[in-house]
Amino acid sequence: MQFLQHFCEMLYQSSFGTMLRESNNAFSVIESVHVLSITLLVGTIAILDLRMLGLILRSVSVSRLARSVLPLSWSGFAVSVASGFLLFWAEAAKMYVNPSFRTKLVLLALAGFNALVFHTTIYRRAREWETLPVCPWRARVTAIASLALWSGVIIAGRAIAYF
Amino acid sequence: MSLHGWFMALAHSPLGHAMQTSRWGFAMVEMVHLLGLALLGGSVLIVDLRLLGVILKGEPAIAIGRDMSRLLLGSLTVMVLSGIALLSEEAGKCYYSPAFRCKMALLAAAVVFYFTLHRRALLRAQSEKPTLWPRIAAVISLLLWLGVGVAGRAIGLL
């Protein structure tokens, strides 16, 4: 942990980090890009989750929807990680001790783990259930977990500014 | 009562008073507003990418439009209600904010467009021959909703 803290302080004090932090516009613009890319990421994931719960697009097969939606989710993920890293760079020393930031990273890891479990287990046999209006309970559980965890990421992310 | 009068009435309402005095009220309502944004963004994107012919080409556009409309209306309701609560905290500031005025104009345009020309484009997309209009409608819709989001983000900055 000592190493992590030093690393965060090094980023914080670097000339690029200082420039970002002290700029009026750059930080705000990156922040806006971050918010919009998270909308893209979480919005598209929620579409797939709601489909698996049988709430929307019941007539569309799950794997077909996943093929349409997941490239959008990954694009949103790439942009939000890149913009998020720049925001982190500017505020690294503060982020290291920020409880909301830590919570957000833990929730993000859990959301990733949930997606990994889904894709390596239940989704492998999607052919058997992808056309059902409501998916099997194991798929529904991961859908609910996904909605809850990604909501948590957004809530914790917003809370960073309040600590 | 003038428009300014309505804004002042909201600021001095019990809701406004509660939002202004509570420690975490604004933060919590803001989080709800952002969760609504994610759902609204997702529903707009799916229906407009379908109109553009980028995704779900084999599925009837009207069926996708119907489900996405439900999701859009649900999330829009959450966003408008949480938005009114956010507004009540700083109605005086918002009344004079160019970003807020811009957001409201874009929101009105986006909603009106969605329920009129956009809906007609969805019906048109049903027909065999792919025409240009549904694609143009999708681009206009995406730009309008994106504009609402960007202007909304700018309220806190300008």
Image: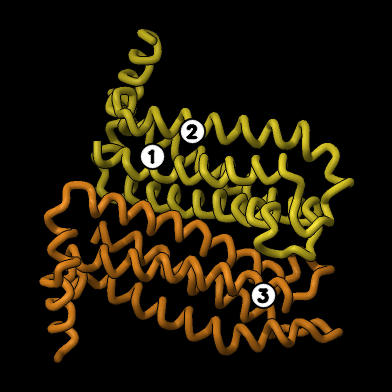
Chain colours: A yellow, B orange
Q: Is residue B110 left or right of residue B117?
A: left
In-front residue for pair A124/A27: A124
Numbered disc 1: secondary structure? helix
Task: Report x, y in % for residue B40.
Answer: 51, 64
What residue is pinned by disc 1? A156
Whether pointer 1 and pointer 2 mark residues with C-beta atoms closer than 8 Å, the reply is yes
Spatial CA distance of label 1 from label 2 is 9 Å
- Which residue is at 43% across, 51% downward? A35
- Name the amino acid type tagged 2: Leu
Task: Report x, y in % for residue B124.
Answer: 74, 87
The vertical placement of A110 against B43, above or below, is above
Q: Residue B68 appears in which quarter of the rendering? A: bottom right
- Which residue is at 47% across, 46% downward? A151
Spatial CA distance of label 1 from label 3 is 32 Å
Whether pointer 2 and pointer 3 mark residues with C-beta atoms closer than 8 Å, the reply is no
Q: Give neighbour class at mark 3: few <14, some 14-19, many 20+ (Cα, 10 Å).
A: many
Q: Is residue B106 left or right of residue B116?
A: left
Numbered disc 2: secondary structure? helix
What chain does badge 1 belong to? A
What residue is pinned by disc 3? B65
- Which residue is at 38% across, 33% downward? A88
Q: Work out which residue is located at the far right of the displayed protein and give it.
A: A128
Q: Give neighbour class at mark 2: few <14, some 14-19, many 20+ (Cα, 10 Å).
A: many
Task: Report x, y in % for residue A24.
Answer: 25, 48
What residue is pinned by disc 2? A107
